[in-house]
Image: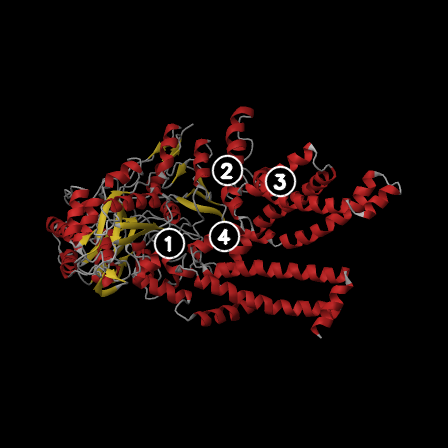
Amino acid sequence: MVFPIYQDPGQLNPYLIATGETGLIAKALYDGLVDVGPDGSYYLRLARELPTRENGGVSEDGLTITWRLRDDVVWSDGEPLTADDVRFTWEAVTHPDSTAFKYSQGWDLIESIETPDQHTVVVHYGEYYYNYLDQFIGDHLAAILPRHACGEPGQMGEWACNRQPIGTGPFMLEEWRPGERLTLVRNPNYREGGKPYLDRIVFPIVPDEVVRKQMLLSGEGDAILWLNFEHADELEAAGCQITPGTDMWLLRMGFNLTKDGHLDVPHPILGDKLVRRAIQLAVEPDLINDGILNGRGEVVAHELFRGSTQCPEPQITYSEEEARLLLDEAGWTDEDGDGFRECHGCLYAGEGDRMRLEIMTFADPPSYSRMIQVIADEMQEVGIESRTGTPDDILERMDSGDYDIAFWDDGYTNDPLGLLGNYYSSANIPTNNWFRFVSREFDDLLAQVRTVRDPDERLDVYCEIDRLLLEELPAVWLTVMPYPDAFSARVQGWQFNPNDLMTWDVADWWISD
Amino acid sequence: MTAYVLKRVLSAGPVLLLISIGVFAVIEVAPGDPVLRIARRPSDVSSEQLANLRAEYGLDDAIPVRYLKWLSHAATGDLGYSYTSRRPVVDEILDRLPNTIILVGVTLVVVVILSLPIGMVSAVKQYSMLDIVLTTLAFAGQAIPEYWLGSMLIWLFHGVLASHLSSGPLFPIGGMCSWDSPCNLVDRLQHLILPVATLAFGWMSVYTRFLRSSALEILHQDYITVARAKGLPNHAVLLRHVFKNAGLPLVTLLALDLPLILAGALYVEIVFSWPGVGRLFYNAAQLRDYPLLMAIAMMISTAIVLCNLLADVGYAYLDPRVRFGGIQGQA
């Protein structure tokens, strides 16, 4: 099987680099203890059972979680997987010098990990952590790494296993020709007899998406990760299999609520909640989904829309007329008749200042630029002068607070705690909370959600947060960004999982003649 | 002569030092933060991780301090580690360099071999049908972007012609070798044809136009008329007098293009999935992989300085006025 990818992953330690390529390949090499399946529930990977109160896996106070590992798992070099490898992974990720991604939030809450025997991992939390099942999840990129094949926990950057991975997954690395291709072959020590069905997967590095598409059309390629949705129709017509793509990446316009990042100075235009509400009503997501995303997205107007924390979809009546009235009310009117509004009694701008905003986004994918053009047009319709751009230093400008509106997508797999904490917690300014959104109420609710144990009660708190965000509007949520994947007609056995990368079930794939 | 050569060699050092300062400054001034580039989505990174990464990359120091650190390491041959792959940048470059030398080197040979006769024919048969066709092609070569031409060649020779003429594609779609067969010479050559053709087309247009105009100039010189008048056959005039003299300036052009063998060809490398230095540099720029950027930029700069040095020394050897003028001018 040939699976062309966009770029050389550089290295295959999923904790060090968060590209799709690394994740895609790491998924075939490594495992977590559990993972999230297509229906959003947990299924077992290296764990023998899910820890529950009934099976003694969760202590009375909820602070001690006992994981029991399968006893038949060996690494691809033949060494047995032990509980100590789990502890090693935790040590490395939480080491003070660590430069690792921490995909789930609770790492810092873990006080110690004990390994009473080879296959038992006892995790002691300092405070209750609801998402303990997420802790060693293979979700997307995280994985259990082997102590014997890597290195000192504090020196993750220099580990040998970053480029010569030893894993428990169905495949192992055979050859890596930098910039040219990686070749995986079946792991003879894989725990499930007879699997994987494929003998070999070649990942040639093909930077040009058109060429990747051509490879599928000509039968030389078998799969594409995160296909440009514009190519989906053509490939589908040629008999390729197109997945819907995960529904987790939600496109959003983020507002800078401050002037130049100063928390005590509101943004002259966007500091006013009425203006943000007006923009929300003026920008109709259908125009983006139907006009640019070929209807492959899905209009979603709030943050907590999926997974185990799905809150009610808000009823928003998009209306230019309503938006204009709100802007009038906010003191932004067009008195010189040039079609654009100026401040006449507005809250934070100088009298007579023009209502002018810049919407910026990332240059890749290119459809982003077209989407912000649509947004700018819709804002112009209600009298807001709007410019668009794809500055190279967009992240730096968001960090420093030198922007008006930014446009990108993000999302969560199952539980949004990490996403919410990153983006909206006042403790996270300016890293990730680029809105400079400061809300005591939000911070309190977020602290509450970390400790609530009852699932229903927890959902209530989440939906309270969702409602608060919709009320305050640090961002406007628009539509799901489609990232469909493609398989050639001959790849069989795959199953679509909206919660994971396409190689999540690579052990089950096979090729038909 | 020795003194002149020595002086030129010694002056290359300060030139390289100045270049390194310039390149370092440009990389630093360009917007972008390397630690923010490792994540696909902004919220993937935590502030703690960012701080640790900054410390690990040494980005907490002031720019001049970082430059001096880089320089002192570079002086001992240590060019640092790539931010993204965490491997020594020298290894990264050495992985790609042979591939680029193959691609651009072969192209350069093809360009020289084909440009000489084409340029000469164009000059000798000035304003003929052949000249007009070749001139048109040369202008097309200058005007057509490589990525478009490359894509068209793939479309034609991998897509269209494949289905009509043979059972499989006429030429491979990209890469250096087939995924499923041993990487032998025939396989490699097949993979070279389309990228070399793409790259050579534009390059040749420069060389043929250059040769044509310098040959035309010589064709109208008196000594050519004299050569013809004394009864030399036409081919002897063209080969011995016109070609020899018109071809000489081409050597300069060639010497200046030689460093391109190391620099690679970005668009061709992208379109044809060629794992060369051009793509490595481009990816490093995208990810703000400073050590890798610096190393590649300095490698190319050094090659350019060396080639210029060779050209200067060569000129001095051929033309005494250069070396005496140079020394007297400095005295």
Query: Is any part of residue A231 visible from this angle?
Result: yes
Within 10 Å of disc 3 (Cα), the crowding (few <14, some 14-19, many 20+) is many
Which percent across, then down, holds residue B108? 64, 46
Secondary structure at numbered mark 2: helix
| Spatial separation of the CA atoms under disc 1 and disc 4 | 22 Å
Towards the viewer: A375 or A422 = A375
- Disc 1 target residue: A391
Q: In the image, which disc is placed on residue B280?
A: 4
Q: Which type of secondary structure does the marked residue at label 1 adopt? A: loop
**Mark 2 to mark 1 CA distance (whole Å):** 28 Å
Q: Quadrant of residue A226?
A: top left
- Pointer 3 and pointer 4: residues touching (CB < 8 Å)? no
Q: Residue B151 carries which label?
A: 2
Alpha carbon distance from label 2 to label 4: 21 Å
- Mark 3 or 4, which is nearer the eye? 3
Chain of the residue under label 3: B
**Is residue A229 shown above or below A304?**
above
Contact? badges 2 and 4 (CB < 8 Å): no
